[in-house]
């Protein structure tokens, strides 16, 4: 069967564009190869090496209750942070996208300002809030006669991660609300649906792709965030801190590489799952 003229023209255009496309992609491919694929390959191979008859780095990680517990705790923390951020940021994002009031722009800027802070600054803010000399410590000393200190625990780390996760959700939800079809909500109201029915049957399904994609990004960010955890204390049992301790304090490059690869695989699996869930809706991670 002969190709249609339009199809033949498209093929000819595609052939003509290939050299220019190769030239355009060459710098990006060179950077990807030199600064990503080569180090990643070396990292994977390094984790497969054995040390002192203890097996490969992957075996040492997978057979260690300490490392597995650290990975599990990191996953649970990232999951709780993601769910809390989606709840708080989702509600706030929908409200800010739908309501117009004086000072709205300033409020949006204030709520999203934490995105400008690096993890170290976020950790410092948590210490100022709930550290030994923080606001809660002084308040607890006055009210109960003892200092309320939780900055150096998983609670403090949760607050820090939530601090920079909520702005991401707010911005994503506000952008997604702009594409929602308001006529569907009006139709649901005209059919007798109440406010919460419209929220559950129209708004949430409409925002689901954006929420899933943003949730995956929040999860990935919480899994690999190091600056905040390091600022709050190197004894926190989360995988990024464990990698740092193994790498710097014990110079065990094999186990550090294995931990890095396993952490990356878990995060990549979550991102891949989220992408498949929302791929049909046109949301790209």
Image (spheres, rainbow, N blue to C red):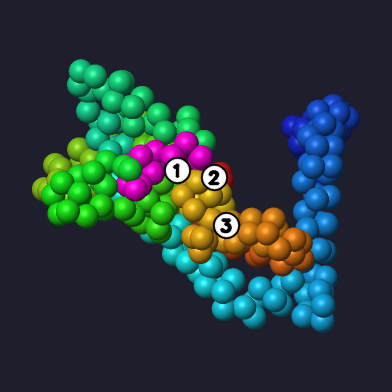
- Quadrant of the image for the C terminus? top right
Residue denoted by label 3: 241
Question: What numbered label is drawn on residue 158?
Answer: none
Residue denoted by label 1: 123
| Residue in view at x 42 percent, y 33 percent | 114
| Residue in view at x 74 percent, y 71 percent | 57
Q: Residue furthest right?
A: 19
Q: Residue furthest front?
A: 145
| Residue in view at x 50 percent, y 46 percent | 231
| Residue in view at x 55 percent, y 67 percent | 71
Q: Secondary structure at mark 1?
A: helix
Residue denoted by label 2: 227
- Left/right placement of residue 247 relative to residue 98 reads right
Q: Secondary structure at mark 2?
A: helix
Q: Is residue 17 visible?
A: no
Q: Is residue 54 above or below residue 74?
A: below
- Left/right placement of residue 76 relative to residue 87 reads right
Q: CA distance from mark 3 to mark 1?
A: 14 Å
Please identify the quarter of the rendering in which residue 111 is found.
top left
Question: Mark 1 touching mark 2, by CB under 8 A?
Answer: yes
Residue 265: where, in percent of width, then height?
Answer: 64, 62
Report the magenta residues as a range: 119-132
Residue 153: where, in percent of width, then height?
Answer: 40, 58
Residue 100: where, in percent of width, then height?
Answer: 22, 23
């Amino acid at each position: 069967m002969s190709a249609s003229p339009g199809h033949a023209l498209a093929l000819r255009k595609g052939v003509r564009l290939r050299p220019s496309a190769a030239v355009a992609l060459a710098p990006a491919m060179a950077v990807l190869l030199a600064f990503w694929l080569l180090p990643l390959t070396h990292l994977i191979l390094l984790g497969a090496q054995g040390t002192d008859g203890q097996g490969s780095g992957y075996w040492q990680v997978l057979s260690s209750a300490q490392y597995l517990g650290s990975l599990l705790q990191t996953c649970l923390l990232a999951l709780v942070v993601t769910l809390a951020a989606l709840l708080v940021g989702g509600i706030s994002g929908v409200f800010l996208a739908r309501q117009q009031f004086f000072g709205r722009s300033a409020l949006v800027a204030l709520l999203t300002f934490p995105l400008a802070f690096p993890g170290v600054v976020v950790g410092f803010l948590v210490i100022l809030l709930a550290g030994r000399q923080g606001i809660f410590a002084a308040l607890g000393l006055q009210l109960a006669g003892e200092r309320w200190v939780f900055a150096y625990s998983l609670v403090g780390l949760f607050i820090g991660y939530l601090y920079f996760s909520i702005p991401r959700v707010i911005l994503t939800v506000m952008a997604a609300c702009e594409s929602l079809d308001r006529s569907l909500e009006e139709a649901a109201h005209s059919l007798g649906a109440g406010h919460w029915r419209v929220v559950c049957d129209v708004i949430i399904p409409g925002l689901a792709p954006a929420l899933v994609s943003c949730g995956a990004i929040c999860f990935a960010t919480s899994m690999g965030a190091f600056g905040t955890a390091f600022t709050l204390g190197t004894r926190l049992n989360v995988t990024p801190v464990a990698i740092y301790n193994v790498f710097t304090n014990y110079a065990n490059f094999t186990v550090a590489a294995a931990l890095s690869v396993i952490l990356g695989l878990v995060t990549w699996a979550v991102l891949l799952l989220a992408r498949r869930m929302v791929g049909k809706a046109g949301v790209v991670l």
